[in-house]
Structure formats: structure tokens, C-alpha cells
Amino acid sequence: MPAEEIEARKDTRILVIGKVQGKIRPLFEKISQYRNKIDLVFILGDLFDSKTSFRQDTIDDVDALIDGNITVDIMTYVVVGDSPLPPKVLQIVESSAGQLASNLVFLPKRCFLKISADGLTVVVLGGRLNPKTVGKMANNYTPYYSYDDARTLKGERNVDILITNDWPAAILTRSVYQSVEIDIKEQECIADLCSSLKPRYHFSSSDAFYQREPFVHSDSVSENTEYWMTHFISLADFQNEAGERSSFAFVHKPANAGPVLLSTISQTATSSPLSLVGSKRKAGASQESSHRFATETRHDRRANKRQKVPPVTTDTCFLCIASPRADTHLIVSVGDQVYLTLAKGPLITRKAFPLLHFPSHMLLIPLGHSPSIAAMSPDDRKVVYLEMQNYRRALQKMIAIKSNSQFGAITWEISRTTGIHAHWQFLPVPVEHIRGGTLEAAFKTQGEMDRYPKFQIRDVGDGSEEHTDFFRVLIWHRDDSGTDSERSLILPLDGSFRFDLQFGRKVMAKLLNLYDRADWKECEQTKSEEDADADAFKAAFEPFEASLAEESA
């Protein structure tokens, strides 16, 4: 979901409303009363009541929204709740980046929203936890999320608002308001997400209204120290029969964002209840596996430690072209030392960049089985690196010509002596992200957030002179005069930190606002779709494949 940007004041007036359950006309009549008083509205899900989705009055309301006969006077965002969207609504929002009508946008169940350049940042995780969320259940608007969905959002920083359908586990702990009769669903992964993001406000849904004392993200507090503080608020359904509070209004002041001094914090504030969640869980383990391992006997654990992963051979390596595991139907070109293939579960689809008209998330892979180019013999390394570069230049030339230089490209590589099979990933990028420095900044910023060492600006060639493993990013574009420009970023992988093997893809998914495609396993295509993509790419690349022979000559 693209980060929506609107013209907003430095102080943004926000109204959050609980689940609507089909009360569409009363809702927007109420919202219209706040015209000129509120800048943004967030609805916590279930705009349409699934129990009445086939009633004629509900169908009429849906049509009225789509046709503009129900006016939405204030920019309104709707979060995924418990119920699936009506088929007609789903079809529209999936093809229109979530927009159903003027000023009415349905947010994907997992998304990051930025409103105004220096203003509001919002993270959303809608739906209910279902660890088996795969296939069709994993699309943008189904009311289910997975552990991976929650983990993917944890890298965000400086978040003003977190919206989740489930409550964070242990949120009532350390509160004087623990005796609440509310039917809630609380999850440890939501507690972990809130602890990681440290939002100023965390909104959720429940049968009745609940507002916890604010809490600081620390187990203990001391004077003259700054702390991140969160207000947790859960809203009841809109126009509920019990008359429970269903809306909350506040003003977002960018000047007040960030940590606050203890002396300015309300005396009712508590230390974080979330720090108690999973304290006995092994760091980095998923909730699913922590529960599974908790049932093992001591003998089971000792047995697991003795198990060794068998070495990957040319028969079992899925990147070896002769391996039975290789997806050979994705291969689009084979050279003397290198072959070119479409990426499995591509980050971008053929439709992502209309100017190109062909799939373009590519892998450049040496034919020989080696963990890295640097690990090859000097003779092999020389010819393989040369042909890898020739393929990359041919791809870049194709991108520049096909897009009239409106696209550049990025190539990234993880060079590790413990790797399985060397490869480079190639992706076209809108040139404005490159010329303005946004692409380079995205890698540096994410690296800082992940507490990696700083990137270095240098060219390491075939990597044979490096004393450590490394992660490499090659950023290329062609300017209006036809001159090529390239910049090389290097992150040494010296073993002092744990590097995320999906780092490159995750950075690009965030930059291109493709959060739902950060995990390749969620982007797998059918065999017929992959065959069609391979044919489309071969047709586009054929004129440029001939230049490979010229480069090698």
C-alpha cells in the first residue's frame, strides 16, 4: 500500500472511531459534523457488517458509497477488522490502492502510513492472528494476519499511532484498571510489536471502552531521563447498545513527538507491562516454536543439538542449473559462465512498472557451485565476475532504453564464505529514487535501525581482496545526456552482528511501498504465470542478449 500523503497542518486533528458493523449512513452523517474541526478519521474495522452483507439495504449503502451518493467529507481510513469485505468492495479496493470513494481508503491489514512530510506516522496490523495464514488468506484485505506480518512491521521507527485489531498481551498488568469485563483477544506478538515501535498512541477494539494509564517503555524510571510513552485506548463499536464510548479525538503535535522527560510524565503513568511478555522466551524465537519447544523433554533437546544439517551439493542446491530442484522454466538466458533467471516469488510483478511491460526482478547466477565469487579459484573468479558484470550491463541498457531513462537499477549481493550458491539480485528502480538519494538513504537508514555497522562507499570488485564477508549494493542510472552513473555501497559482515538475509528485499519493499510482498513465499505464482513471465522477458531481452558477446570480445 503506497504511503498516503495529504496536505496537513503541522498539528493534525484526528478522530478514531470503533468498528461500525454496517451503520454506514449514521457514521458518515456523524463525521460530516466534524467538518473543519477534524483533519483525519481512522475507523477500526468492519465498516460493513458481514451478517447483513447480502441484505438489500447494505447493498444499497455500498452502491451509494461507490457512486458518491453518501458523502465522505473528511479523509477517512478504514482498518481491517474481524469481517471480510463484501466481494464488490474487495474487487474495487484491490484494483485502486484501497480507495473505494473520494476521501475513503481501505488500508491493507499490514501497512505503514505516512501523512505529510514531517507529520504523522501510523502502523496498522488488522485482522485476527492465524499462524496458518497462507495463500488466499494472506492477501491484503483478509481478516487474518500471521506472526511474520507482525514481525515485518517491527523495523519501523518514530511511530505516532499503532492500530491493531488484537490487544497486546499483558496490557492490563501494572494497571489499577484491571477489573474490566471485556471479551478480548490478546497476543504476545502484538505486545512485541508495541514494545518495538513505542508508539505515542496504540488503538484497538473491544466490546466496551477501555483506556489504560500511559506507560513508559522501561522497567524502571529515574529523574532527568527521557522515556518513550504510550497511551493504550480500546474503543467500543460505533453506536453500541450499551452506550460505551466509541470514539476518541486528539491532536497530533509533531513538536511533542519523541521521548519525554520523567518530570513531564503524568503521575499515573506506569512502567511498561509489555516488558513482562515473553521474558522467559528465547530471544528471536517465534511464539509458535517457543510453545512447541516447551513440551520437549530434556532428552529431545540434547538430540536436537546433535543433529547436523547435511551439506548442500549440486544435486540438492536449487540454484544449480543441473539440480532436480532448479526451476528451469524460469531461466531466460544461459551464458558461458552465468545464467539469468526470473526471481521466484518476485518483489515486483509485470504490472508494477507499466513503462517496462515485462517482469524484471532477476537473479544472475554463476553456473558453477560456489558460496561466493570471492571463494572461486582466481581463473574462475575472473571470467565469472566479468560475465556477471556483462549480464548486469545488458539488463541496465535494456531498462534505460525501454523506459527512456526513467528507470535506473539496483543490484545487491550477499558474499559469504558460508553461503550456498553465489548470486546477484537485480531490480529496476524509478530514477527519482536514485537521483534524489532516496534509495541510498533507505539502505543506510534501515541499517541504522537494525543496528548494523555503517555502509562504506567503495568498489570491492570481485571481492577477493576483502578480509570479511560483505553485503554489496550497486546503484546505477543513466542521466539525460546518456551518461551512466554508478555508486557502490558495502556493508562488511564481520560476524559481530546477525545479518538478515532478506535485508535487501525488505528495504526495497519498503521503498517501493510493497509491504505485502516483502516475503517471497507470499508472492509465489502459478506455473502458467511464471511461464508467461519468462516468455515476456525473453522477448524483451533478446535484442540486448546479443550485446553480451560484444562485451566479452
Image (cartoon, rainbow, N blue to C red):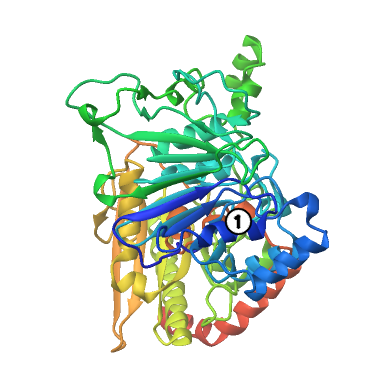
Q: Residue furthest left?
A: 224
What residue is at 58 percent from the left and 69 percent from the top?
71
Other residues around mark 1 within 10 Å, as few (<14) / some (14–19) / many (≥20): some
Residue 503 visible in the picture:
no
Q: Residue furthest top?
A: 298
Q: Nearer the viewer, residue 252 or 551?
A: 252
Instruction: Residue 38 in the image: state x and y as whole percent.
Output: 42, 57
What residue is at 55 percent from the left and 66 percent from the top?
72
92 up-or-down from 403: above or below: above
Q: Nearer the viewer, residue 327 or 484?
A: 484
369 up-or-down from 411: above or below: above
- 529 with respect to 463 (left or right): right
Instruction: Residue 319 in the image: state x and y as whole percent.
Output: 59, 56
Secondary structure under the numbered disc 1 in the rendered image? helix
- Quadrant of the frame with the C terminus: bottom left
Residue carrying label 1: 27
Residue 292 visible in the picture:
yes
Q: Amino acid at mark 1?
A: Leu
Which quadrant would residue 235 be assigned to in this image? Answer: top right
Instruction: Residue 155 in the image: state x and y as whole percent.
Output: 42, 44
- 313 with respect to 118 (left or right): right
